[in-house]
Image (spheres, coloured by chain):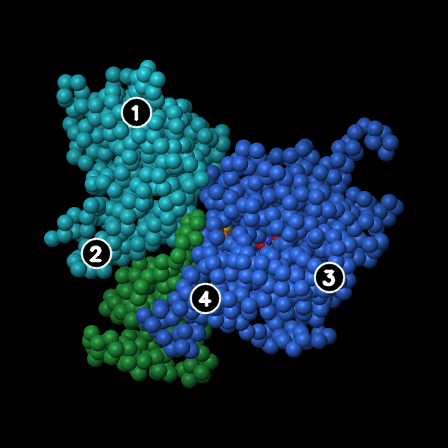
Amino acid sequence: MSNTTLGKPHRSDPADVSSSIYDVVIVGAGVSGAIIANELSQTGFRVLILEAGPGHDLTIPGYEQYLSRFYASASKDNNAPYPRNRNAPMPRSTDVRRLQPGEPDASGYIVQNGPLALDSTYTRVVGGTTMHWEGKALRMLPEDFEMRTRFGRGLDWPISYEQLAPYYRKAEFELGVSADVEDQAYHGIRFDPGYVYPMRGIPASYLDKTVARGLNGAEVTLRGEKFALTVRGTPQARNGVPNPRYDGGKGYVPVGAVSVEQVEQGERCQGNNNCVPICPVQAKYHAGKTLVKALATGRVKLLPQAVASKVVIDPGNGRVRHIEFKAYSDPGSTEHATGIARGRVFVLAANAVENARLMLASDLPGTSNLVGRNLMDHPFLLTWGLMPEITGTLRGTQSTSGIQDLRGGAFRRHQAAFAVSIHNDGWSWATGSPYSVLADIVDRQNQFGAALRRRLVDQVSRQLQLAFMVELLPDQNNRVTVDARYTDPLGNLRPVISYGLSDYTLDGIAYSRRLSRLIFQRLGVEDHTTYDPLDYAYVSYKGEGYTVRGGNHWAGTHIMGTSAKDSVVDGAQRSWDHENLYLVGAGSMPTTGTSNTTLTLSALSFLTAERIRGELDQDRSPATIAAA
Amino acid sequence: MHADQAEFQDFLSLSSVVTGFTAFQLQGTGQAESYFSTLIDILGEATVAALLQVFRRVQRETGEDAAALDRLLRAAIFSDEKLGPIARNLIKLWYVGTWYPLPAAWREAFGELEKDTTFVVSPAAYTEGLLWPAIGANPAGAKGPGYGTWSAPPRIPEV
Amino acid sequence: MSLKRITTLDELHNYLHAAMQLEHATIPPYLTALYSIQPGTNSAAFHVLRVVVVEEMLHLTLAANILNAVGGAPDLAREGFVPLYPAYLPDGETDFEVGLQRFSREAVETFLRIERPARSSEESQRLVRRQRVDRGLLPTFRAEDDSDLHFYSIGEFYQEIGRGLAYLQEEKAKSGETLFSGDPARQITPDYYYSGGGEIIPVSNLETAQEAIRLISEQGEGFGKRIYDYEGELSHYYRFQQLVLGRYYRKGDAPDHPSGGPVDVDWDAVYPVKTNACLADYPQPSELHAAAVEFNARYKDFLGRLTQAFSGRPELLLDAVGDMFRIRETASQLMRNPIPGTSGLNAAPTFEMPLPTET
Ligand SMILES: Cc1cc2nc3c(=O)[nH]c(=O)nc-3n(C[C@H](O)[C@H](O)[C@H](O)COP(=O)(O)OP(=O)(O)OC[C@H]3O[C@@H](n4cnc5c(N)ncnc54)[C@H](O)[C@@H]3O)c2cc1C
Ligand code: SF4
């Protein structure tokens, strides 16, 4: 590996960049951009990546700065390790407040237009949101691609599970997924014969095993359909034991920490229980791992601290002429220079919210007027209680297993499907445990010394939290827009989001609550779930109240489809309106089923890279040049 | 080592009683001196000295009698309007390395203190918090216990 | 113990046991230096030491694999397996001290000597006749005339193992047998062992055995006078040297001339632990003493668990990793506690085992 470029991405003069024409200009150094940059640079193309955030991240000391900021931060929210950056602001869950009807809340970076306040986040640094993602890497179900046809709900994809399957395999390699194939073939998920994941499944936690003992085989009936519940290992993009059978017996070598200097670390998950917001040893995949490979080709220029501000179109042919960006040298100061990035092909990989924001800020709502619309996320319902025995909370990765049996079924005609994860980190997400428990024991239960210690064990080490990740269908009223009243310090328009839940999803949420009661009853779990009506995420439905958290799975703002009328991009994520423009990432997904989005969006990136390569190749051939 | 060795030893003994960890374990976090100076920094020497003085008296009066110690500590410190909140904060400081602001009532009665805000004493204060060993876990994001260890039953130290 | 030229299987077993003992013997000194670093400081040194410790564990495991492959039974829990420190390693004509000390310039000097032992230039110098020190880590060599000789350095010791393996295998082959008749189920495979750099090699024949020996003896100092070993990994010697020279090596650098980014070392951000501390240094009874005793007991359990792992239960290596976590916690606690009566010296694990009889 050539180590000269990585680690210290050149921050060259924007003018320098503006004077070159790249084969491909990519906006965003997250996983979707990184994969495309790597795929194309490996085959000889010259790539420019504009990245809004800072880029000191590819060195161990740089990475450790994040870690130390996280340690020293009193609020351990999921953006805690990352410095506030006025010029490329990011949403933080701690910014979210209860909304008053009709009054947008503009106090955080994202302007919340309601009706429901959404506390999902993303990260704007090199590596993007994978710096703090959790790393769950489940494939979508085949039926998720055909929601309209099969269930009369949502939309169909223009491509099928079968068509995406080869790219899923590439994504599972790139992200380094640990799972056992025999656990993952359910609800129609098919693998090629002989296929195994790169690494064996991450061992189930002691809590998982205890829950499984009480629960496996339990039967539930939903709208007449019977489902047997099983606790199942979750595929995860973190390093485990390599499977020697991978790739026809060639095996797999885990990718550890990214660094300029030789540092072996992160080849295997150590159970730091901190994948979100930052894995201290880089056992968890983050896009930096793909970026260093791309940078090592010598054909990729990564320009950090360059915020894409406008997509400029040639009115004659609708092609993108260039992308305007604002380059700043100090995150604390808005002083900046404006540059332009020119290329043959342009790729927006800034995530579902930022892609739409950038298009709308460039006044490009699309022929279909669907840019920004169909915003999706996965609403989460948390339920929590105390196990009858000590299972040892806060050990291992945040979640190692879940219950996937209700991800699919005929009931999807009527109500949302959901996936359940069992949390090894206890009630952290729901209640702020263990900090909140400590405060309660000390301040309210008036305990100290040995009694305090015993209560802590009793009240923390028995915690069980179930997270129900509920399907949300595309809905044109859920959307990202921009509004001239709201700009960031660089003068870029901020995203304004409108977000609400349909009855379809609310029925899924209500059923999740019911199922969690059944599970708790069966396990003898003492239910401690309460939803505070004053919480910003509180919703009432059919006489019961729930707190619905954001799932950080922003999607759907530039959905793919079969024509320029019904969608923004085609099945290869190419813009219908601008033939040299691709909008990539979860924004292209017409539905997201009950899969965390990243594996699927990574698969799509591979597919798109192949398509772009084909086009550039053709474009390069003398015949085409002559014709043009 | 801190200037006033005796005061520091008293601070350790008090900390040991309120946290339920031994003086050896407290020193073993490497944070004892930094917490002692943090306390003085926030509250001032006089208040810290007063707290330790009450503690010494309690200790003298109770000797080896644990039940009496418990009772007297509650009477003289935990239910004292001034010292109680400080002692509770001291526990939290040791457990999670974080200073939380004193209650509003305290500030009203005894005055605002400039440094009485929420802060983590240092990155190490977080990783060396007592909360983690108390529940047989590692601080999230540090001291990873090793691949697969989560599969085994927890090992929680007896108290 | 003294060893003879390898002509019998028994003698080979003795050598391989000695090799395991030797590979283990560097771990306590490295751990002591590693744990003495204050958290959040000396990132570069921390990472170098961590990798080296992990790889010494790998060497130990490789030696166990060879021993198992030739029908031996590794035993790390037996008396005398852990040396008393300071111990000594040969460096040509002299021995040098290997002790338990905090991370410091002197400690790094010692580590450099451990990782790059002197090389004898001539075959005749593989063994030298000289005064034996007490606590030498390498067994002596019993010559034909019954006099005690010394290996010139560790390299010569491994050379003899390599030669012995080849010789015995050839002898066995004459009668249609194989030296490598050990139970394959006792091999540690990559499933259960991972390390940063080199991979564990399951040993099943002469080829894999020689490969394992090469990994053990070359990971330290690199391969063919280059800074990288034959697996393309920066060798231990040059990793440590980065700390002294204050710069990282990068690919293509010539030995002694690193050209990478700066390495910051803060020699003062280290707990002032007593060098070669022993239980007798700690007042009794005291929590400090009790913790030091407990540390040794845990370390002994750890070695016991490794022994079981090397005896057909490789899955126990996962537990051994968990043991290391607890070992580290106790070690850190000791190192942050002052030893009463010394002015400003802190305690440290003593690694005395078996525990000296208490008086
Ligand atoms: C707490 C949390 C947990 C998650 N857990 C999971 C999980 O377990 N499984 C899963 O599948 N997914 C998970 N996700 C979602 C996952 O992180 C995202 O799906 C994924 O990272 C998206 O990748 P991306 O490359 O499309 O976008 P991003 O990772 O967001 O990258 C976009 C990049 O573009 C840059 N950028 C933005 N605007 C501009 C601009 N104007 N100009 C230049 N650059 C710009 C950003 O700085 C960023 O680097 C989680 C997310 C969060 C927040
Ligand atoms: S559990 Fe820890 S080591 Fe494993 S991936 Fe998560 S943060 Fe990294």
Side (left or right) of A480 relative to A91: right
x%, y% of residue C301?
28, 48
Colour in which the image shows chain C: cyan
Q: Contact, CB < 8 Å: mark 2 with mark 1?
A: no
Q: Contact, CB < 8 Å: mark 3 with mark 2?
A: no
Residue for badge 1 = C161
Q: Is mark 3 within 8 Å of ligand 1?
A: no
Residue for badge 4 = A387
Q: Nearer the viewer, mark 1 or mark 4?
A: 4
Q: Earlier in the sequence, mark 2 or mark 1?
A: 1
Crowd around label 4: few <14 · some 14–19 · many ≥20 (10 Å): many
Crowd around label 2: few <14 · some 14–19 · many ≥20 (10 Å): many
- What's the chain of the residue with tag 4? A
Q: Nearer the viewer, mark 1 or mark 3?
A: 3
x%, y% of residue A455?
38, 71
Looking at the image, which residue is at 73% across and 61% down?
Answer: A413
Residue for badge 3 = A413
Residue A511, by quadrant, is bottom right
